[in-house]
Image (tube, helix red, strand yellow):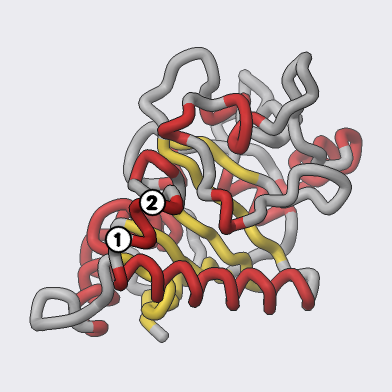
Amino acid sequence: MQALLVVDIDHNDNWGPKYIQENNQKKQVMEEIKKVLEEKRAKKEIIVFIVLTSGGKITGQEAQLEYRPPRDTAQDSELTVKHSLNQLEARAIKSQSGKCIVCEELPEYARLASFLKHRHGTEFEPAFIKTRGNAFTNQTLAPYLRSMGVDEIILAGCNTFQCVLDTAVGALEAGFHATLLSRCAYPPLTGDLFNNPAWSQNAQNRSGQSKFRAEVI
């Protein structure tokens, strides 16, 4: 099963309306991401949002899922995760004010871009906070994805050769396949540095996980 990870499309990376209107490449990527989200939502497929923040009172483990890994185990079993999620209905954490953390509670610079239309009500879409480039440094992400039956990560977001690539490497290291949606990546994969084989080979080489694949479509 696939899960779409939308990485760092937030105000921290200048995805507010003003910056998008001033950047034609961002406009194109925005439209492509909106199309993919519409398709995935229509099919009720798994969508996960990743937000980068410098830290503070809200940590990765406190993001969006009311799920806490056992403190005395290094890695959760699928059964443990499934039980935890079933018990808590995988619903968004709300602050006492009832607001969504990643849309309304984080500092303005770190909030999700409004065009994503993140669902944090009854049609819940999980979001995970990270403090480094690789989204899988939030140790609740991989167990959550496994508990949902996910074996392939589809990537969209920015920055292509930084946080998105780091997350692809993290996905391979965690035992997932990783596929980049090139039309949904910013900056675009153009020129010798950003050609498709270079991106996928980079992810493969850095992860050292030869039995898992990285590719670009």
SS for dot 2: helix
Quarter-wise, where is residue 83 in the image?
top right
Q: Which numbered marker is on residue 22?
A: 1
Residue under the image location 45 percent in, 46 percent down: 10
Q: Position of residue 38 (x, y in %)?
A: 68, 73
Give the amino acid type for the residue marked by disc 1 in the picture.
Answer: Glu
- Report which quarter residue 164 is drawn in: bottom left
Quadrant where the N terminus sits is bottom right
Q: Is residue 157 left or right of 66 when viewed as pictured? A: left
Number of callouts in the render?
A: 2
Residue found at x 34% / y 46% = 13
Residue found at the far left of this picture? 192
Picture coordinates of residue 146 (x, y %)? 66, 56
| Kind of residue at badge 2 | Lys
Image position of 85 (left or right of 118): right
Left or right, 198 with reference to 157: left
Per the image, the residue denoted by label 2 is: 18
Name the residue located 73 percent from the left edge and 20 percent from the top edge: 95
Q: 10 Å neighbourhood of mark 2: few (<14), some, or many (≥20)?
A: few
Q: Position of residue 47 (x, y in %)?
A: 65, 60
